Image (spheres, rainbow, N blue to C red):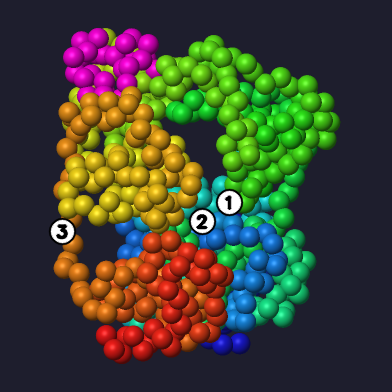
């Protein structure tokens, strides 16, 4: 037994002995033996600089916070891409080696050590900003050392957890739905006396910052174990043993001490993994393998229709409440008429429900198939006729009334949302009130609300403070980014990311010229934009062809001023000047980020994806790509890695 393991054993023995001595009046070891073990523990802690948070040699004071401080992460924490298909996982692994470990179902925490001392602990939050919970981290039952034998700066990511056994003991009155809920509430507690009672543990799964260099991810985990952390259990895998290893983990789910919702594969070669980069959502060096969805039977009680801002009526199934994946659910979206019809639904039918990706409730099957539900011919909100529209082979139900109050509510609600014009104080209920009173007829009326000050202040729920806050927020929104404005207009299927791509594609020096370009760009030119397909292109062109929409934009521009575009640094020139290049496949001599720098240093534009507007498609020598066939068809020049290197040297 090494010294770290001996410390852990001694802490367990002494804490158990203390509990017996003080709480049961039945000592388990003589006092002299307790003192001898205590002295041994203190000596080992001094020698190794390793001190556990629950060591009897320290006394962490209890703290009560008034609120949890928000902290911005130095590096954004992305999510994991997911699959339930073992073949997709095998294809992802390819000829590489990686690790397979449990996907722990808890709350992610980032720990920071400086000069061997724990100085900070922050939750993942939204990936960019989390909550500081250092006072709680200091009282974890296990896994978070207060002191370690490493003097440099170390940032460790891991999962806060409660074991199944501890959960059962704490949850005797069934107050908590599942271990994850209890874990989350305990970690976010303002009072760490509460946290200490919850028996929390920490499983490290990643080093985010450290001066020590590692070649392999498995080396990171092994080193963390040497320091005294409890890293995730892992097995080295490749394409040959992946299925066997997945089955091993699956067979041990019930025996595993923590709840888990799957496994995580990560490439073992750290340099290779980092070189793959990431999307805006997830890193490309890892993939989550989720267990097959659990389905639960229930009874369908109703199907209601929600009206969206474009007039689409989305069917939602209402059923008897059931527990799936450790949470209670009673409704699920049916998405469109085609899905609704395919299920042959009827009220009181027996249906099976699951959670897609263990998050979103979906109907899996209808066991009764009575097919007795009648699709409404009237809008549930305004009573106008409904119509069925077929798009991409799927049927959708629409309200035919352009002035349907539900449409107006959703349009305005979208316009004022955070990623759009970011106007606080206009909830859906408030918007509905303002529409019913005639204050809001279209989006431009938002900027005329001051004329109704007296009437608004007489409304329930409004006071001078809330009114002033609303007006201030409206004023602030008058100066905005062009991309936010385009997103706020509610063009079908145009999210914020596509709005930003549109502005970049316009390639204008000022936002007003860019908006003019976007509103008049021909479809044939527009589809050259990154990630712009037929549906997106047609939606943009058709929206700006509608005279009512142009009138609305012009009216809004009476109140809105766009922020100037940021001045970009002078573009470098070289052999790739004015050339758009996309690199695909696996390269022998370069990582993707290196290729990007080379292209840009030589004056080119490094494309984030394949497009017909490319000048060159550069193909890796280690592994090619199916995009070669597309490029040949589209008349794009294809360059091999060797040819690319030659061009670089000439450049």
| Residue under pointer 2 | 107
Q: Residue at the spot x=56%, y=48% of the render?
A: 182
Q: Nearer the viewer, mark 3 or mark 1?
A: 3
Please state which of residues 645 and 244 is positioned toward the viewer in this rendering: 645
Determine whether, in the image, residue 284 is placed left or right of residue 97: left
Q: Residue at the spot x=52%, y=15% of the render?
A: 381
* CB-based contact (under 8 Å), mark 1 and mark 2: yes
The N terminus lies in quadrant: bottom right
Please state which of residues 434 and 381 is positioned toward the viewer in this rendering: 381
Please state which of residues 84 and 30 is positioned toward the viewer in this rendering: 84
The x, y position of residue 295, in whole percent, is: 75, 45
Residue 455 is inside the magenta segment: yes
In the rendered structure, find residue 86 and report the number of the disc placed on it.
none
User: What's the distance in space between the residues labelled 2 and 3, CA to CA?
Assistant: 40 Å
Is 103 rendered above or below residue 407?
below
Q: Nearer the viewer, mark 2 or mark 3?
A: 3
The x, y position of residue 517, in whole percent, is: 26, 45
Secondary structure type for disc 2: strand
| Residue under pointer 1 | 180
Is 185 rendered above or below residue 95?
above
User: What's the distance in space between the residues labelled 3 and 1, CA to CA?
Assistant: 46 Å
Q: Of marks 1 and 2, which one's residue comes earlier in the chain?
A: 2
Is 34 rendered above or below residue 354?
below
Please state which of residues 85 and 33 is positioned toward the viewer in this rendering: 85
Determine whether, in the image, residue 611 is placed left or right of residue 30: left
Q: Residue at the spot x=70%, y=29% of the render?
A: 319
Q: Residues within 10 Å of mark 3 (few under 14, many from 20)?
A: few
First to last magenta residue range: 432-457
Secondary structure type for disc 3: loop
The x, y position of residue 289, in whole percent, is: 64, 63
| Residue under pointer 3 | 567
Q: Residue at the spot x=18%, y=14% of the render?
A: 451
């Amino acid at each position: 037994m090494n010294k770290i393991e001996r410390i852990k054993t001694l802490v367990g023995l002494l804490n158990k002995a203390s509990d017996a001595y003080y709480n049961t009046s039945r000592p388990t070891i003589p006092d002299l033996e307790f003192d001898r073990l205590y002295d041994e523990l203190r000596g080992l802690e001094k020698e190794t600089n390793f001190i556990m948070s629950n060591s009897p040699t320290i006394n962490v004071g209890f703290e009560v916070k008034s609120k949890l401080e928000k902290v911005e992460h130095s590096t954004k924490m992305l999510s994991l891409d997911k699959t339930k298909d073992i073949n997709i996982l095998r294809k992802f692994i390819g000829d590489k080696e990686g690790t397979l470990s449990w996907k722990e179902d808890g709350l992610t925490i980032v720990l920071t050590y400086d000069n061997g001392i724990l100085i900070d602990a922050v939750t993942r939050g939204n990936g960019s900003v989390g909550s500081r919970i250092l006072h709680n981290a200091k009282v974890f039952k296990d896994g978070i050392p207060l002191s370690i034998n490493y003097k440099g700066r170390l940032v460790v990511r891991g999962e806060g957890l409660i074991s199944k056994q501890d959960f059962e003991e704490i949850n005797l009155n069934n107050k908590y739905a599942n271990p994850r809920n209890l874990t989350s509430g305990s970690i976010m507690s303002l009072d760490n006396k509460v946290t200490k009672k919850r028996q929390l543990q920490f499983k490290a799964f990643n080093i985010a910052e450290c001066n020590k260099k590692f070649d392999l991810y498995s080396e990171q985990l092994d080193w963390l174990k040497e320091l005294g952390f409890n890293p995730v259990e892992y097995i080295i895998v490749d394409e040959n043993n992946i299925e066997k290893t997945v089955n091993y983990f699956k067979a041990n789910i019930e025996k595993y001490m923590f709840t888990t919702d799957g496994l995580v594969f990560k490439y073992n070669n750290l340099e290779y993994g980092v070189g793959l980069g990431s999307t805006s959502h997830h890193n490309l060096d890892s993939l989550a393998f989720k267990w097959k969805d659990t389905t639960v039977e229930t009874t369908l009680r109703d199907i209601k229709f929600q009206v969206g801002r474009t007039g689409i009526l989305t069917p939602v199934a209402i059923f008897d409440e059931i527990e799936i994946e450790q949470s209670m659910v009673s409704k699920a979206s049916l998405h469109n008429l085609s899905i609704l019809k395919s299920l042959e639904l009827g009220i009181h039918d027996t249906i099976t429900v699951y959670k897609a990706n263990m998050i979103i409730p979906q109907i899996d099957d209808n066991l009764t198939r009575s097919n007795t539900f009648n699709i409404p011919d009237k809008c549930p909100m305004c009573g106008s006729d409904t119509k069925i529209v077929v798009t991409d082979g799927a049927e959708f139900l629409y309200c035919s009334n352009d002035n349907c109050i539900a449409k107006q509510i959703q349009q305005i609600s979208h316009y004022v949302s955070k990623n759009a014009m970011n106007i606080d104080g206009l909830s859906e209920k408030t918007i509905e009130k303002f529409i019913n009173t005639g204050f809001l007829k279209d989006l431009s009326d938002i900027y005329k609300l001051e004329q109704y000050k007296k009437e608004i202040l007489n409304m329930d729920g409004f006071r001078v403070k809330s009114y002033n806050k609303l007006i201030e927020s409206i004023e602030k929104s008058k100066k905005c980014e062009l991309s936010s404005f385009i997103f706020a207009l509610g063009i079908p299927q145009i999210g914020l990311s596509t709005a930003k791509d549109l502005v970049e594609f316009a390639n204008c020096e000022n936002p007003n010229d860019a908006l003019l370009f976007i509103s008049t760009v021909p479809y044939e030119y527009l589809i050259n934009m990154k990630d712009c397909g037929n549906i997106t292109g047609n939606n943009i062109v058709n929206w700006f062809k509608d005279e009512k929409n142009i009138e609305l934009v012009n009216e809004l521009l009476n109140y809105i001023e766009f922020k100037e575009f940021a001045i970009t640094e002078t573009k470098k020139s070289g052999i790739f000047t004015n050339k758009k290049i996309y690199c695909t496949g696996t390269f022998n001599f370069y990582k993707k980020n290196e290729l990007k720098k080379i292209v840009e240093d030589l004056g080119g534009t490094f494309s984030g994806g394949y497009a017909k507007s490319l000048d060159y498609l550069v193909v890796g020598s280690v592994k090619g790509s199916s995009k070669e066939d597309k490029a040949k068809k589209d008349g794009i020049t294809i360059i091999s890695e060797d040819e690319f290197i030659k061009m670089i040297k000439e450049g």
